[in-house]
Amino acid sequence: MPPDSPRTQYYTAATLDGFIADDHHSLDWLYLVPEPGNEDYPGFIAKVGALAMGASTYEWMLRHLILPGADHPMPWPYEQPTWVFSHHPHQPVPGADIRFVQGDVVPVHRDMLAAAGGRNIWVVGGGELVGQFYDARLLDEIIVTIASATLGAGKPLLPRRIVGSSLQLASAERLNTGFVQLRYHVTYDGHPDAYPLHMTAKILSDGNSARIPRELMYNKRLALTAFGSGNITEDPNLFYAVAVLQPGKTAADAEQALIAEFDKLKREPVSAAELQRAKNQWARDYIVSRETIQEKALHLAHAAVIHDDITTADGEFEIFMNVTAADIQRVATTYFTDNNRVVIHILPRESGSR
């Protein structure tokens, strides 16, 4: 994910034995830890544009922080719009932008992204709601501050089985004698942007009639060969394009031409015919890559190890077939930016050099 893209984050505190609240959904244990562990909170919340929380978290905040007689009285602490997931009606907070919703997190997440205005989304909790965002492949980062405390039982940090390489530790920081903060980047093949990015690779570079070879090799005659691809095994990451120049052509000209092809995808939606061609190519690859026992085993292994779900070996065909021109334009705008780009020129040695 590009560093300037909005992230969906789970930012919370947990006990050493992995609980965020006791059996009664109470966070009172947190107030008993001698030293505060939220020094980074002002910087964190400044980058948040929308929040999501479950009904139990919302009700605990009302009882202990907001309503008359609260243990730690304070005004509603968030200026950002807050979505509360619940199957039952709840008391609103006057003056606060609180929106009560239920059901699938995916459409709500789209609304939250629109409201966040390019800032991050904070899934406050509880753990089960965070699990639903993870199940929908919407969770990008987990920031958990571990307290020097144990509960023995309670509400778990994240009630999901997440194994393999899905969680990548980004940092571990000792805050004080009471807290340590861990940051995890959540990766998975099947990220919502991975599917249109795979299709984008087809449009740009699959076959001599694809955009990059057609433009650089035949129309502009800049390159002997030109191609590109996307390495999107676990998360949208490396997308590359290469041009091997014709004699007398400059690296600067080829660089400009390659960038122009990426920029064109951002400005103009691909045509229906071009998108269908890419889908046909993907369907071809899908079929021919399953002809041998070894190839079938590789697909099953990928599904089991990367997805942690064997059924995904045959479960993604319709997702790829439903990619739209708007999806292609969206991921191009998101990922093909100046800040994400690294350009390398490999030049021959000058005559007589070693």
Image (tube, rainbow, N blue to C red):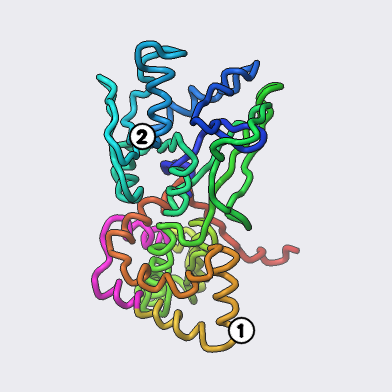
Q: Is residue 17 magenta?
A: no
Q: Residue at x 36, y 34 (%)?
A: 50
Check disc 2 and report its element: helix, strand or loop.
strand
Q: Residue at x 39, y 11 (%)?
A: 69
Mark 1 or 2 closer to N-term?
A: 2
| Depth check, front residue: 171 or 31 | 31
Q: Main secondary structure of the magenta part?
A: helix
State the residue position of label 1.
Answer: 294
Q: Residue at x 35, y 75 (%)?
A: 279
Check disc 1 and report its element: helix, strand or loop.
helix
Residue 289 locus on image (x, y percent): 51, 82
Q: Which residues are magenta?
A: 256-279
Residue 165 locus on image (x, y percent): 62, 56
Name the amino acid, label 2: Ala
| Depth check, front residue: 167 or 32 | 32
Left or right of 178 in this view: 318: left
Name the amino acid, label 1: Gln
Q: Which mark is residue 50?
A: 2
